[in-house]
Image: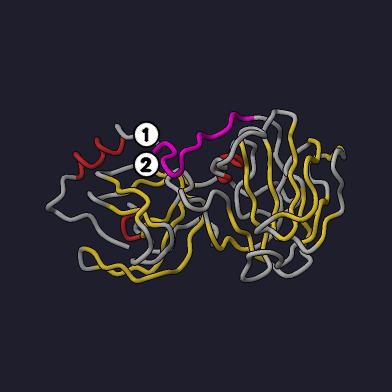
Amino acid sequence: MRALRSTRSIGLLAAAIAATALVPLTAGPAQAAPSGYAGSCPTAGTITQGYTANHDGVDIANSMGTPIYSTGPGTVIAAGPATGYGLWVRIRHDDGTVTEYGHMDSFVVSVNQRVSGGQLIAYMGNRGVSSGPHLHFEAHSSTSSTHGVNPFTYLAERGVGLPCTPGGGGGTPGTNFSTWGTSVRVRADARLNAAVVTTLTGPTRVNVTCQKRGDMVHAEGYSNDAWSYVPALGGYVSNIYIDHPASWLPGVNPC
């Protein structure tokens, strides 16, 4: 939480915000896939790791055996053992994109099987390189893609916001806010020692999908330990740099 200081011109700030559009995707070499099918929520749970240049998916944690669903209609192109994942499922959708589901305990589909959006495909597990039960979800622009696109953006384009509830409408794609200040660092996690994903040079419009508690940040006489996840930037911004009077942003789900 913060208050506007007399040393900063409110008029200039408003003009800068108005002139700044939502920040384009900068994390990772891949570009977002075009909009396609109407999406479905892949699973329920807590987001424990977002999308960055070094992590081209999203991790959603929950208890062992939590159901996992296809995000859209398509054909299963892989189902079985996979290095790092233990077990995985890959689905090629009708728009040419591919979704990938890893670390499951078991799966209930087979290669070449046709699936619909929201259809049960697997159960959450802890196989492969994993520190606890979770789904690692990736989205790819095609079968030849080697680096996933931003899964938050991919699902938001299809009407699903993360975190979400299967069968419950997919949540909200996100909430728009503006940042303030210069040289605001966007980090890979809600920690001051986490890698810097990018730096905002001035007031910027951002789309926030969730927020969580992290390291305490101090600025202009205020302190705040809440951080917001911005999918388009692939990282977290301290809420102290979000231009809103509340320290915990209203209408934004916890990560």
* Figure check: 222 above or below 53: below
191 or 240: nearer the viewer:
191
Residue farthest to the left, as pictured: 7
Residue farthest to the front, as pictured: 83
Q: Amino acid at mark 1?
A: Ala
Q: Amino acid at mark 2?
A: Arg
Q: Earlier in the sequence, mark 1 or mark 2?
A: 1
Please give the residue where the numbered disc 1 appears in the rendered image. 21
* Residue 181 screen position, x and y as percent: 23, 50
Q: Secondary structure at mark 1?
A: loop
Q: Residue at x 34, y 66 (%)?
A: 192
Q: Secondary structure at mark 2?
A: strand
* Residue 104 screen position, x and y as percent: 75, 60
- Residues tagged 1 and 2 counted as in contact (Cβ below 8 A): yes
Q: Which residues are magenta?
A: 23-35
Colour convention: secondary structure
User: Splitting the image into 4 quarters, where does residue 254 fall?
Assistant: bottom right
149 or 117: nearer the viewer:
149
* Figure check: 163 above or below 33: below
Residue 25 covered by magenta stretch: yes
197 or 85: nearer the viewer:
85
Please give the residue where the numbered disc 2 appears in the rendered image. 205
